[in-house]
Image (tube, rainbow, N blue to C red):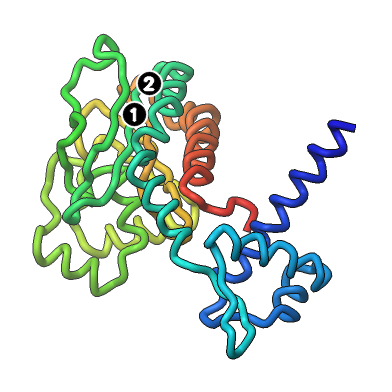
Amino acid sequence: MKDNIKVASNQAFGKIFQIIECLSASPLTMRLQDISIQVHLPASTVLRYLNSLIEGGYAYQDKESMRYGLTWRLLRISDRIKDTLGIRSMASTLFNELSAELGLGACLVIDKNSSCFYLDCVTDPKLMETTLQYIGKSSPLHATGSGKVLLTQYSEPKLASLIKQKGLVKLTSNTITDVETLENELARIRKQGYAIDDEECELGLRCVSVPIYDYTRQIYAAASVFGPTNLMTKEHIVETVLPRLKDTAKELSFRLGFDINE
């Protein structure tokens, strides 16, 4: 009996969120019949859930048109989540597990002022003989794996403006400093879904990075795994590191509201 109640309750929550998703996707208020068609539920069922949303202050019915829409009360929930659950707190455990499992460093990076900004970085200091960008510091976008991932969503004019403003600074002999080479590299990254920093930011270090998406379906951040070149061989990256890194990025994208099934 309890199991039946639990299943019914879960189904009810699922239907309510279907209706919320439907209303949120419409630029205008919607008729009951149209909502019913889009969520594949009987009008009577939809009406019952709409009344519950209205009672809770999350939806309203326009008295003249009799159409339904969402209130801004849902934004209050969104703002609270953003205030209390920043991406770093969501990612912390994931990145600690990733680093410990692989025995390599892991970084969480965002684009801030057109530079790589390190929100989090987990590594064993004994593993690294070279220096590393620490939390709160920045690196050029074109010279890092995460930066190149973030650059893949730049439009051509925005990329050109960035290069004009900041140039393509050479950090090592492997740093990309040619515009055409960078454009070709970004096209390749878009196609394969990941980027590699092959000692482009710092000699002796190799890094692989993947995108993290949010609920807008845009790249919000980049996740990377890095280590000495003798440990981060290209074979090890492809066979072991990259699949595990993608799993972490997929989970974090889900936590940021990205629909991984679309």
Crowding at dot 1, Cα within 10 Å, few <14 / some 14-19 / many 20+, comes out as many
Q: Nearer the viewer, residue 162 or 64?
A: 64
Q: Nearer the viewer, residue 75 or 40?
A: 75
**Number of the label disc, if any, that sits on residue 104:** 2
Horizontal and vertical percent for residue 74? Answer: 48, 58
From the viewer's perspective, is 162 left or right of 52?
left
Residue at 20% in and 38% down? 201
Mark 2, Cα crowd under 10 Å, few <14 / some 14-19 / many 20+, is many
Identify the residue at horizontal 53%, vertical 27% (top origin). Answer: 240
Q: At numbered mark 2, what does the secondary structure look like: helix, strand or loop? A: loop
Q: Is residue 45 above or below residue 76?
A: below
Q: Which mark is residue 148?
A: none
Disc on res. 226: 1
Amino acid carrying label 2: it is Leu
Percent x, y of residue 212 = 43, 47
On the image, the x and y values in percent for residue 175 come to 20, 45
Seen at 53% across and 39% down, the residue is: 251
Q: Residue at x 40, y 61 (%)?
A: 187
Cβ–Cβ below 8 Å for labels 1 and 2?
Answer: yes
Q: How many marks are shown on the rendered structure?
A: 2
Question: Where is residue 262, by image quadrant?
Answer: bottom right
Depth check, front residue: 38 or 219: 38
Q: Name the residue furthest right.
A: 1
Q: Amino acid at mark 1?
A: Phe
- The answer to whether residue 202 is left or right of residue 259 is left
Percent coordinates x, y for residue 221 in the rendering: 35, 47
Q: Quadrant of residue 134?
A: top left
N-term mark: 1 or 2? 2
